[in-house]
């Protein structure tokens, strides 16, 4: 075999092994347990105001961090994965704080005031702030 074919074959094998190693690591990586993390205490309105005022600063402060959010429930739904989703009210009727529970929190209804802790995953301008992996605090 030619020398360049051997080198190419070795590089392909090394690349395949590296890709398999990365895939194995990502697949077996432990998930975050938000119940053990200290959350940043905010109201739904404060979180919305932070993203509306300066999205870049709010991303730096809150993105991928545990948030402990208090506020009034606007709606309770179930997503396509069967998880309970609670929308918190803000001063803008077109924008909600969208919080997905990791486990069923029990009986929550619109108008209730609750405290929720989860991981902030981003802001969709003029739509909502998204928080996932949540648990009911009170």
Image: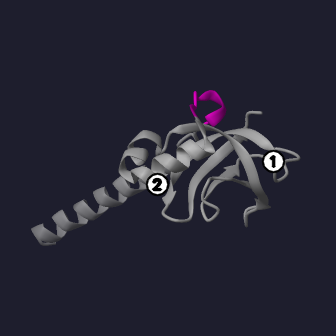
Between circles 2 and 1, the one closer to the viewer is 2
Marked residue nearer the N-terminal end (2 or 1) = 2
68 left or right of 53 in image: right
Q: Which mark is residue 13?
A: none
Query: x, y percentage for residue 74?
Result: 75, 55
Q: Quadrant of residue 35?
A: top right
Query: x, y percentage for residue 29?
Result: 52, 43
Q: CA distance from mark 2 to mark 1?
A: 30 Å
9 left or right of 31 in image: left
**Pointer 1: what residue?**
104
- Judging from the image, what secondary structure is the residue with disc 1 in? loop
52 left or right of 80 in image: left
Residue at the far left in the pictured view: 3
Magenta stretch contains residue 1: no
**Pointer 2: what residue?**
52
Q: Work out whether 66 lies above or below 94.
A: above
- Asked if residue 28 can be seen in this view, the reply is no
Magenta stretch contains residue 35: yes
Q: Residue at x 38, y 43 (%)?
A: 60
Q: Quadrant of residue 113?
A: top right
Q: Work out whether 8 lies above or below 136.
A: below
Q: Quadrant of the N terminus?
A: bottom left
* Boundaries of the magenta span: 33-41
């Amino acid at each position: 075999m030619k020398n360049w074919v051997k080198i190419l074959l070795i590089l392909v094998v090394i690349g395949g092994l590296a890709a398999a190693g990365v895939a194995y690591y990502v697949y077996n990586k432990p998930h975050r347990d938000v119940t053990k993390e200290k959350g940043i205490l905010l109201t739904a309105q404060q979180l919305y105001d932070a993203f509306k005022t300066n999205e870049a600063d709010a991303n730096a402060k809150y993105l991928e961090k545990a948030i402990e959010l208090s506020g009034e429930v606007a709606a309770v739904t179930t997503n396509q994965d069967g998880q309970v989703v609670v929308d918190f009210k803000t001063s803008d009727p077109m924008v909600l704080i969208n919080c997905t529970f990791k486990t069923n929190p029990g009986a929550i209804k619109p108008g209730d005031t609750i405290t929720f802790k989860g991981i902030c995953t981003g802001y969709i301008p003029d739509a909502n702030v998204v928080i996932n992996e949540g648990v009911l605090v009170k």
